[in-house]
Image (spheres, helix red, strand yellow):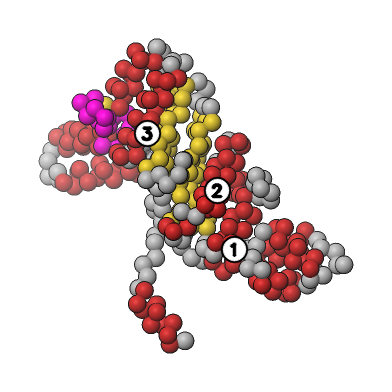
Amino acid sequence: MSNITAALVKDLREKTGAGMMDCKSALNETNGDIEAAIDWLRKKGLSKAAKKSDRVAAEGLVALAVKGTRGVVVEVNSETDFVARNSDFQALAKNITGVVVGSGNADVEAVKTAAYPAGGTVSDAINNAIATIGENMTLRRAAVIDVTAGAIGSYIHNAIAEGLGKIGVLVALESTGSAEALADLGRKIAMHVAAASPLALEASQLDKAVLEREANVLREKNAGKPANVLDKIVESGLKTYYKEVCLLDQAFIHDPSKTVAQIVAEAAKTAGAPVALKGFFRYALGEGIEKQESDFAAEVASMSKS
């Protein structure tokens, strides 16, 4: 039997996108002949991952999990919404979330090389799912949020299973107060974040480029006014903008007469201790991905000519 080196396994994996153990098995079966190993994987249906990798994956699932004072949210993409209802794909998303919860590391490349519960790495599990299900899949992003004491509020919108859906939100509340009160507040704020889609917790965290763009719009709309008047208009306009996009400044959806900051401050009475809203994450499935528009009729017509 030929000596199957790690470099040979790596080469085959890069050529086919198949899992590491599948590549090793293929090389063992073909005495180290890489071309024969590629054919072996193709016959087994395990080399599909590479062929699918150029397809846009903008569907899939947002998955979240909370363990103690740590919350995790990840986005795992597929090509079609149909796959999101596949139990194997759902298990993949949940298991990846579990890996991130355990490590506390949200770096996507690090997550891909982390050990997967069923064996191999997370990357191996994704490639195996691609080969089995037949669609391109990607681990797009992940986030971790922690508090020293308090609670992580969570909410899944359009849930298709526990912890799985189209929009996932995590909210971090720092407090030594009542766990029950914090959990209730955390969920309500998470629901607010899902609906209101804030850009930042507070104004100081907004991207400077975004603020400058808003200020420029205000200046252009009011061009010709005296400089001192224009400065006041811009200042007032930005304050209004903060109320629209900063979580603490937004009107609370459950009680629009109060801001989120006021609701958090008042929660100290119910919780029995001061409460601080430390941060949040909001993942909406496929946001920012340019989806391919296909003309089904044209596609069928072109296939009939071949």
Dot 2: within a 10 Å radius of its alpha carbon, few (fewer than 14), some, or many (20 or more) residues?
Answer: few
Query: Residue 155: where, in percent of width, then height?
Result: 40, 36
Name the amino acid type tagged 2. Ala
- SS label for mark 1: helix
Labels in figure, total: 3
Q: Is residue 202 visible?
A: no
Image depth: mark 1 or mark 3 in front: 1
**What percent of the width, then of the height, locates residue 74?**
49, 44
Q: Which residues are magenta?
A: 244-258
N-terminal label among 1 and 2: 2
How far apart are the two marked residues, 1 and 3, measured between alpha carbons? 36 Å
- Which mark identifies residue 205? none
Q: Quick one: label 2 or label 3, which is nearer the N terminus?
A: 2
User: What mark, if any, has residue 131 been given in the picture?
Assistant: 1
Disc 1 to disc 2: CB gap under 8 Å: no
Nearest to viewer (mark 2 / mark 3): 2
User: Disc 2 and disc 3: Cα gap in Å?
Assistant: 24 Å
